[in-house]
């Protein structure tokens, strides 16, 4: 497909924009592993291994956080539908969160705005994967 090919029902010009103009982004964080009470709660905490093992959709994670663990770290709560993108190690791994999740700092959470479809972004990032 090229920029000259038109999709059925699409007659407008192709728009090129920066991701930051159509989505909001932020990375996660990791609570201290030396504090056991931060782990084992009901908050899914996505790691790169969850993404490589889980496929397109992430519904469950190997590790969970407690509310205290979430509050004590830079981890952020992402809403369902956020696009998760690995920035280190397995660069380019990509998943879609099914429910509310948090993540490590190695993962970028991308919340798409109304001008961007999350499925499109997921497949675009897969296409760009090194």
Image (cartoon, grey):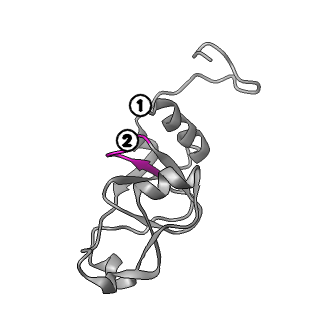
Q: 17 or 12, which is in the foreground?
A: 17
The residue stretch that appears in magenta? 84-92
Q: Quadrant of residue 117?
A: top right
Q: Is residue 8 left or right of residue 54?
A: right
SS category of the residue bearing label 1: loop
Is 129 situated above or below 117? Answer: above
Counting residues from the start of the chain, the first of labels 2 and 1 encountered is 2
Question: Residue most toward the right?
Answer: 8
Is 92 situated above or below 37? Answer: above
- Which residue position is annotated with label 1? 130
SS category of the residue bearing label 2: loop
Image point 41% across, 54% down: which residue? 48
Is 76 situated above or below 19? Answer: below
Q: Mark 1, residues whose alpha carbon is within 10 Å: few (<14), some, or many (≥20)?
A: few
Residue 112 appears in the picture as rendered: no
Image point 52% across, 54% down: which residue? 53
Residue 72 percent across, percent down from the top left: 26, 78
- Which residue position is annotated with label 2? 91
Q: 95 or 14, which is in the foreground?
A: 95
Image point 58% across, 64% down: which residue? 59
Image point 43% across, 56% down: which residue? 49
Count of marks, rendered view: 2
Residue 87 percent across, percent down from the top left: 34, 46
Residue 103 lies in magenta, yes or no? no
Q: Can you tell which mark lies on residue 80?
A: none
């Amino acid at each position: 497909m090229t920029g000259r090919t038109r999709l059925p029902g699409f007659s407008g010009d192709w728009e090129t924009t920066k991701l930051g103009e159509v989505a909001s982004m932020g990375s996660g964080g990791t609570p201290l592993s030396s504090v056991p009470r931060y782990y084992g709660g009901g908050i899914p905490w996505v790691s790169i291994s969850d993404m490589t093992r889980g496929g397109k959709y992430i519904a469950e994670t190997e590790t969970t956080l407690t509310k205290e663990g979430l509050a004590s770290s830079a981890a952020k709560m992402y809403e369902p539908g956020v696009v998760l993108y690995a920035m280190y190690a397995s660069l380019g791994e990509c998943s879609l969160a099914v429910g509310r999740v948090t993540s490590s700092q190695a993962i970028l959470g991308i919340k798409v705005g109304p001008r961007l479809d999350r499925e499109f972004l997921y497949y675009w990032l897969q296409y760009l994967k090194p």
